[in-house]
Amino acid sequence: MLLRRLPWMAFSTAAPLPLYSFSSSIPKQLTFSPLSFCSTSELHLTQHPDNNKPEHETDNRRSQLLKPGLYLVGTPIGNLEDITFRALRVLNSAHVILSEDTRHSGKLLHHYNIKTPLMSYHKFNESQREQLVLRRLKQGEIVALISDAGTPGISDPGMELAKLCVSENVPVVPIPGPCALISALSASGLSTDEFTFVGFLPKHSGSRRKRLMASAEQTATQIFYVPPHKLSQFLEEGSSIFGDTRRCVIAREMTKFHEEAVKLVAERTSVSRKTIYSLALRKFGKQLEVEDDSS
């Protein structure tokens, strides 16, 4: 797939009882297609300047499009159609795009014919990149930040850079787009009046249990990011702490198509997942989505 497999999300919400906990029933699975909205004033797409044109012409065109600053750009969470026209315009106009994984992001840019240079920016080099990026911003450049999927800075690299820019009076501009937790919550059937986004739980069992106990005491919907390989552990620990008076919803692969068709067939044949996925697209309809080369 174009982007890394997203973590599963688990929700809990309070029942009208004094004890707030998980339900022992089998969790639901959500599958739905997203809607993407943007202002009509943002529908103008500008092609990336020709690489053969003088550098000053390129800079002039960028300056006419956007003001210098850090742009936090939401990117698809599984389906390439999730992206907005405004996001494409920003990515096309930036001097550089900070990317969590340049290989994954390169596929997105290639699909939309965006030639802007990529610079790796992830949790392992975040602190080293900050001052370099800050210097470029103060020199008047347009810097776009994207994650592998969704909105940057939400359980992804970007939070510290945004904080640094704010402290240095450098403009930080959010470019709204897909966000896994909001997409899942909106279709979960749970209360959306009040909710707490917990994100990923601590790795240490003691700290993890302490955080789950704190969530169990809250009446608001609780949202967790859970890696697929830790889902069973999460359900076991969560059910023992929350009990059986809280509903639980599991959301995954919310905007992809044909994933389960592909997985089941690949397990029973020697054909690669990529080949099976291509066949599924041809049979069930063309979707703007790129599968990974894994087999």
Image (tube, helix red, strand yellow):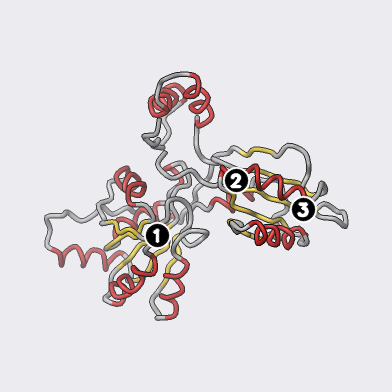
**Badge nearest the viewer, 1 or 3:** 3
Residue at the top extreme?
A: 269
Q: Amino acid at mark 2?
A: Lys
Q: Which residue is label 1 attached to?
A: 122
Which numbered disc covers residue 241? Answer: 3
Is residue 195 rendered to the left or right of residue 66? Answer: right
Q: Under tag 3, what secondary structure?
A: helix
Q: Under tag 2, what secondary structure?
A: helix
Please give the name of the residue rendered at 38% of the width and 25% of the height, measured from the top-left corner.
Answer: 275
Q: Position of residue 4 (x, y in %)?
A: 44, 45
Q: Mark 3 or mark 2, which has the lower sequence index?
A: 2
Disc 1 crowd rating (10 Å Cα; few below 14, some 14-19, many 20+) is some
Q: Is residue 39 above or below residue 165?
A: above
To which quarter of the image does residue 272 belong?
top left
Q: Mark 1 or mark 3, which has the lower sequence index?
A: 1
Q: Which residue is label 2 attached to?
A: 230
Dividing the image into 4 quarters, which one contains the C terminus? top left
Disc 3 versus disc 2: distance between alpha carbons?
Answer: 17 Å
Q: Amino acid at mark 3?
A: Ile
Q: Position of residue 197 (x, y in %)?
A: 63, 59
Which numbered disc covers residue 30? Answer: none
Q: Position of residue 232 (x, y in %)?
A: 65, 42
Please give the name of the residue rendered at 47% of the width and 24% of the height, measured from the top-left corner.
Answer: 266
Q: Are marks 1 and 2 in contact (CB under 8 Å)?
A: no
